Image (cartoon, helix red, strand yellow):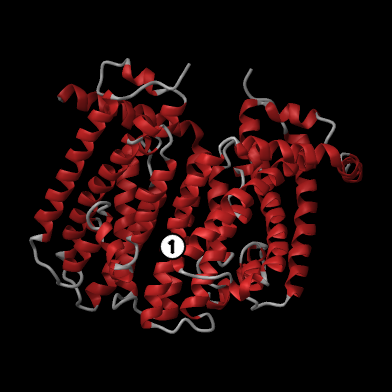
Amino acid sequence: MNTYIKLYLLLVRTSIRSRMQYRFNFAFGTILAAFIQLSEFLMIAIVLAKFGAVRGWSVHEVGYLFAVMTLSKMLYRTFADEVHHLERYLVEGELDQLLTKPLPVLLSLMPRGFRLMPGELLQGGGILAWALGAMLAGGQVTWWAVPQTLFAVLTGAVVLFAIGLATATCGFWTTRISMLQNMTEDAAQTAARYPLTLYPGWMSGLLLTALPVGLVNYVPALYILRGELGAWVFPLLAAAACLAVLLALRFWKFGISKYQSTGS
Amino acid sequence: MISFRTRLFKSNPRLYSALAAKAYARNIQYRGSHLLHNFASAVFGYLYACIWIGLGRDHSLGEYGILGMMQYITFTQASLWISSFTTPGLGIPQSVRTGQIALDLMRPVHLFAHLAAKEWGQIGYQFLYKSIPVYVIMLLALGLTPAHHGTTLPIALVALAGSAYLSICIGYLIGVSALWTTESSWLHWGNQALMNLLAGFFIPLQWLPEWLQAIAWASPYPFMLYAPTQLYLRKEHPIVLLGTLAWCAALTLTCLLATRMLRHKVEVQGG
């Protein structure tokens, strides 16, 4: 295990160094990533500025939902970006190379695309500080909200990773997974930036169970910001994240046993 | 240089139509897979419509109302395949990385016209196999009929043709920037973000703050989605097409100037 961790860290360092060969691209990409994130939040902020609360959720509360989702996604994509891009490995037959290495495939896959995402960190962190700051000043939440939110970001990242891994695993049968990712990752994460009460019952149910993105930000926000549910939310989030990742890993293991190379 | 290249534009109409036809034919090989992709696109559109339906339960949606916003989102989501989801950088960044750009510039045809012709084929395909299915799926899913019984569709399609050309020009300029930056995918994503914000994809422009409206109207983006949608909903006079035309002319000139600069900058990478 210790060897695996050392190896993982070495591979991560190598990945970072290779990216830093193109410093201008890194700096430019960081600035534009922050701009893109900001423009996405602006769309939500404009809706809130125009209509006020959304189903009883204030602009700060919706900002909180957006920020927690952004930070969880940032963590997931920092460590497991290549899982999201598995289609490329399947289509071009690159996965064959990874299979020949004396390492678990996930361990050699994940560090390859280790991605520093300071743009998303600054933007997500900035909106979180703004939203929590306003709610602290208004007495809606206490300082306990800060560690509780960090916990929600961590468990949320694990849930998003599990969804991403399960979706990528489908590629062992279908090869192409981008359409599926559009629905299970992109659309689901976009939906969870708003309170789930905005959607029809079947959709909010789906976003809490089969595609549990609601566990990333909505469920923790119900307790942390609005005092609903109870403190049992945190063990529930931890258990749900563990269960989701275990199921995803088992599915991955089963899927990789069915892998057939597409190369010639 | 520009006038000489302009002559080349005129002299090759058959070549351009052949390039467009080939791009269309290449895509049609994957139409089954792409038709499935439309489902994902329609899911996104349905999601955005749900947001407006949910907001409409608590608030008045102004001159649009819930039904109007459902029509609005249906049209913008279907139009994205014409005015936004074009080939990133028209494929120039890959040409720069592989060195193919040098060969492309040696062809006896202007680079902009060559790539634009290919992109017209791509857009034609996307219109038939993506925009129309997404439009129909969303109408069915939301229980809608075409706005004004479809009588406004012809003028909206004229506006969309203009927006497709604007999209080609912007894609070309993003692609050309790869000569200086090597990697222009971030500019492509930045352009997509601006489309979402300034083209009125999700929020009608009149609901933006005034400062943002001013920025939007100083750019070509409103003519790429908002104007065609307003024409579709019969909320705008067709005179707005003059704006589309003006931006088409301005961006064409910019693309020609960019090509001239590109010819001086080009260097072959790799061996």
Q: Quadrant of the N terminus of chain A?
A: top left
Q: What type is the residue that disc 1 sits on? A: Tyr
Q: Where is residue B113 drawn, in percent x and y?
A: 79, 42
- Quick check: can you spot residue B211? yes
Tell me the element at label 1: helix
Q: Where is residue A240 drawn, in percent x and y?
A: 15, 50
In this picture, is A156 found above or below A219? Answer: above
- Chain label for disc 1: B
Q: Where is residue B50 drawn, in percent x and y?
A: 40, 68
- Quick check: can you spot residue B110? no
Q: Where is residue B59 drawn, in percent x and y?
A: 40, 83
- Identify the residue under disc 1: B46
In this picture, residue B149 sits left or right of residue A12: right
Q: Nearer the viewer, residue B51 or B93?
A: B51
Mark 1, Cα crowd under 10 Å, few <14 / some 14-19 / many 20+, is many
Q: Residue at x 33, y 24 (%)?
A: A259
Q: Residue at x 36, y 82 (%)?
A: B58
Q: Residue at x 71, y 64 (%)?
A: B159
Number of marks drawn: 1
Q: Residue at x 59, y 64 (%)?
A: B199
